[in-house]
Image: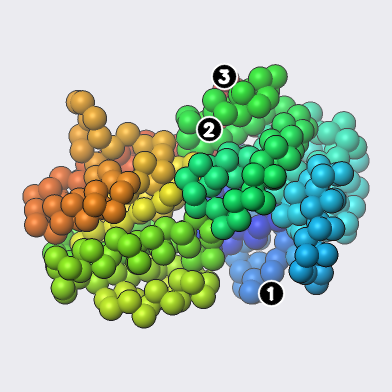
Amino acid sequence: MNILMLSVTFPYPPSRGGTQVRTFNLLKALHKKHKITLVTQRTADVTDEQVKGLKQWVDELQVFPQPTKQSSSGLVGKGIRFARFVLAGTPPSVMASYSPQMQAWIETQVATGRFDALTCEHCVNERYVTPEVQARVPRRVVNIHSSVYGTCQQQITTGTTDNPGRDRINLSLLKRYEIQYCGKFTDLVVTPPEDRQQMRDLRPDRPVHIVTNGVDLELFPLRLRDPGGQQLAFIGAMDNLPNIDAATFLGREIFPKVRQQYPDATLSLVGSRPVAAVQALADIPGVTVTGRVPSMVDYLHQATVVVIPMRTGYGIKNKTLEALAAGAPVVASDRGLEGLTVDGADIPLRALRANGVADYVAAISRLFEDAALRSTLSHHGRAMIENQFTWERAGDCYDQVITAQSSQ
């Protein structure tokens, strides 16, 4: 098949963030069987070498500059953006990445009739699927990544939103938006089973498929030894709102309680682009904020325990899969373990579950003290990833959706 892939997020190298990792690895899998044309955007930090590196994984690459953000700010600017959202039905975050030049190129190429299918890698790309595009491409798949309506609803419920009043107003608008844009596509793709029911409720007229996230096992090998000690780690892009919340919760509420019991304990917050709120956590005794590092897996191998205290964010978390693949013992929230079977009757124990501060401290203390339990989690976690969560397996599922070989 000749497939057109739309991704305003530049998906290379596949270590820049969750969206990039998922997009690149599914693209890589599809490229083995199909002709891939990728249309994307580059930000100022994307290098020519990275563009060159991405080209080897596609048949055709079209790169457009990311649109310049509007300078209007303050109450007037916010009011204008909100009014446009109400009237047009498209969130400001989607409009911010819209490029008329990219739209024109897509419509011109689609008009030739050369594409059998298109994929939108994240809903932010749906704006480019106009009626003209819909009429010319018979198979149209949106890889949702995360529901904007579900994420907003979750942040309100969990109290992790930074502006509850705004988000309560936005909630009904986002629901309307999600229902509307999903109607453009023949098929909807989500990552965990929990998301499928929500999307079915929103669009019962569209088939909803599960394509899990995965891990590149060569990039995340099983660690050769248990480092022991009392070293905690959390990994992720540190400009992502769910990660910012998790890092702050870990650094300010959980870690100080751990250090009361273990004065030599350390915490590494590992990930690129740390915002000011994350950088400030380095002032807490024992906390290191690394910024971008050459290799995440080194920190996973060195950690006694990896803590994933996510309180918001939809879908299977790449950070959880990568930690389990590397053999790091994991303590995570229900949200951090979403879509994964890690405990229960007749289930090998693969991670420890915690949600409140006291639960985290107890689970971390248990792992600090019990090397045998660390070994159990390490080996069972790795085995689950090898059997269920490789990118090869996810790529095969995605291929079946696009080629209409899978059932709802």
Check residue 44 in the rendering and tell me which mark sits there, or answer none. Answer: 1
Coloration mode? rainbow
Quickly name the residue at label 2: 195
Compared across the picture, whether 68 is left or right of 407 comes to right
Q: Amino acid at mark 2?
A: Asp
Check residue 148 in the rendering and tell me which mark sits there, or answer none. Answer: none
| Quadrant location of the C terminus in the rendered image | top right
Residue at point 54%, 60% (across, down):
240
Q: Where is residue 111 drawn, in percent x and y?
A: 91, 40
Residue at point 64%, 50% (across, down):
165
Q: Say which label, 3 or 2, has the lower sequence index.
A: 2
Q: Say which label, 1 or 3, has the lower sequence index.
A: 1
Could you tell me if residue 368 is visible in this image? yes
Q: Are marks 1 and 3 in contact (CB under 8 Å)?
A: no
How many other residues sit within 10 Å of disc 3, few (<14), some (14-19) or many (≥20)? few
Q: Say which label, 2 or 1, has the lower sequence index.
A: 1
Residue at point 69%, 69% (across, down):
43
Q: Amino acid at mark 1?
A: Ala
| Quadrant location of the N terminus in the rendered image | top right
- Distance CA(mark 2)–CA(mark 1): 34 Å
- Distance CA(mark 3)–CA(mark 2): 17 Å
184 vs 308, nearest the viewer: 308
